[in-house]
Image (cartoon, rainbow, N blue to C red):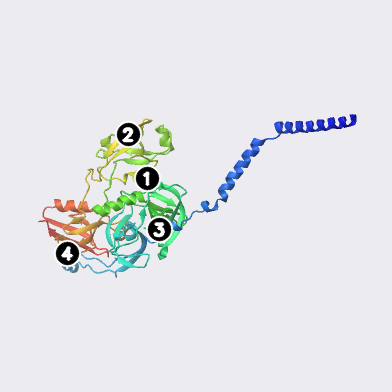
Amino acid sequence: MKKFGRYTLTLLLVIAGAFIAVWTYSTYFDKPNVITIKEEQSLKYAAISNDGENALTDLTYAAEKSIHTVVHIATQSVRGGGWSSGNPFFDELFGMRRQQQPQIARGFGSGVILSEDGFIVTNNHVIDGAQNIKVILNDNREFEAHLIGADPSTDIAVLKIEAKNLSFITVGNSDDLQIGEWVLAVGNPFNLTSTVTAGIISAMGRNLRINQDQLAIESFIQTDAAVNPGNSGGALVNQKGQLVGINTAIASRTGSYTGYSFAVPVTIVKKIVADLMEFGEVQRALIGVNISDVNAEIAKELKLENVEGVHIIGVPENGAAHEAGIKIDDVIINVGGDKVKTSAELQEKISQYRPGDNIKIILIRDQEKKQFTVTLRNKHGDTEIVKDNTVVLGAEFVQIGNSEKQSLEIESGIKITNIVKGKLKEAGLKKGYIITNVNKNPIYEVADFKREVENASGGILIEGVYPNGELAYYVFGND
């Protein structure tokens, strides 16, 4: 019994020692919290990477929704062909002769159907200078297109074809786009019809300064979706198949895609299209300021908290901003409730308004935020909306773009798109003729032509050129 008691005591001491050892290790050496955190982190990352179905973006729905709404545009125009005064007698008297045979120039691009009855949006540079415009649908049907209007400042144009029950695109909101979001570019690169490429939004509000128009607006969506010649005027769509931009340009030294492409945001497109369809020309609203982006030097000088915003460097006395009380060295940070960080973003926001609209502008002055209400004006300095201004003396007009100006070596001009009974037709003017001067004054837009005609006393001298390079002038009485 004594022996058994000694064994029992020894066993109890061993067990007790084991418990003490385990308790001591757990208390002073084991780190369960660290192990638990590592385990949780491992499980989180594993769960994300193993969710294959959600990680892969399916763009087939967006492609199917949009591909039938994008069209192929083919243009044709005549270049060259000699010179003429418009009067055979003067041609013979001054020895004007045809210097070269006319050449046919052809171009290609894309467009997007906006309505079931055939309104189509494209880039202005796709149809600029074209005398004939043909639209080929995704089902290979072909239609002759009529130009409704064009806006060189945003590189947007609207066409119309005589068709019904067309598939048309759903318009989204480019303001909702996020950096890194997947998008599709749909168009006809290199005449390869119905082509779809994918990429992500890589930047917003890009100003490339490629548009040489005096009132150019550039606030491009930048993507890495492959876009090539022929894609211009095509659709940039989100994952829902909604239109968020019109593909317009690429950044390239070769003329082909090298990594980045640029689209006009649909927020701008909607306003331009609506104006062209309703008024025949864009109702451009202006704040009336000269601006630049805020950089580190300006931020330091003005003691700004952040290096962002739009710096006011000039305020013309007859502008809307001057009337509202905005001053030089103010920094605009918000327009109509939307934050603006750059000049491009400011132009994009203002482009969505019309002359006469009142907008709230928040700016920083002397390190304090101040709010102003600005009544926007047009480029003539008033708030009027111009209506029916494209029809003068029986003719309809459209402004011409920079490429046609360069081709014809002219600095101004409006083109006759349609002419009916009236003084211009009686004087001999024909469809396609570009009026560059009236009574020796340059004509940049239809309003200029209308003003010169109304103010003329006696005869009216019209000078201009046809798209094939043929110079012509006409004289008629203003009675």
Vertical placement of residue 316 versus 443, above or below: above
Q: Tell me where residue 195 sits by quadrant.
A: bottom left
Disc 4 and disc 3: Cα gap in Å?
A: 48 Å
Residue at the spot 84% in from the left edge and 31% down from the top edge: 8
Type of residue at label 4?
Answer: Gly
Q: Say few, some or many: other residues with alpha carbon within 10 Å of mark 1 (under 14 / 14 to 19 / 20 or more).
A: many
Type of residue at label 3?
Answer: Lys
Q: Is residue 37 left or right of residue 243?
A: right
Q: Secondary structure at mark 3?
A: helix
Type of residue at label 2?
Answer: Gln
Q: Residue furthest left?
A: 479
Q: Tell me where residue 432 sits by quadrant.
A: bottom left
**What residue is disc 2 on?**
371
Vertical placement of residue 457 versus 110, above or below: above
Q: Which mark is residue 428?
A: 4
Q: Nearer the viewer, mark 3 or mark 1?
A: 3
Q: Nearer the viewer, residue 408 or 242?
A: 242
Disc 3 and disc 2: Cα gap in Å?
A: 43 Å
Disc 2 and disc 1: Cα gap in Å?
A: 21 Å
How far from the left and from the top, in percent, is residue 185?
42, 57
**What residue is disc 3 on?**
65
Q: Say few, some or many: other residues with alpha carbon within 10 Å of mark 2 (under 14 / 14 to 19 / 20 or more).
A: some
Name the quarter where the C terminus is drawn.
bottom left
Q: Residue furthest bottom?
A: 101
Type of residue at label 1?
Answer: Ala
Q: Secondary structure at mark 4?
A: loop
Q: Nearer the viewer, mark 3 or mark 2?
A: 3
Q: Which mark is residue 344?
A: 1
Q: Secondary structure at mark 2?
A: strand
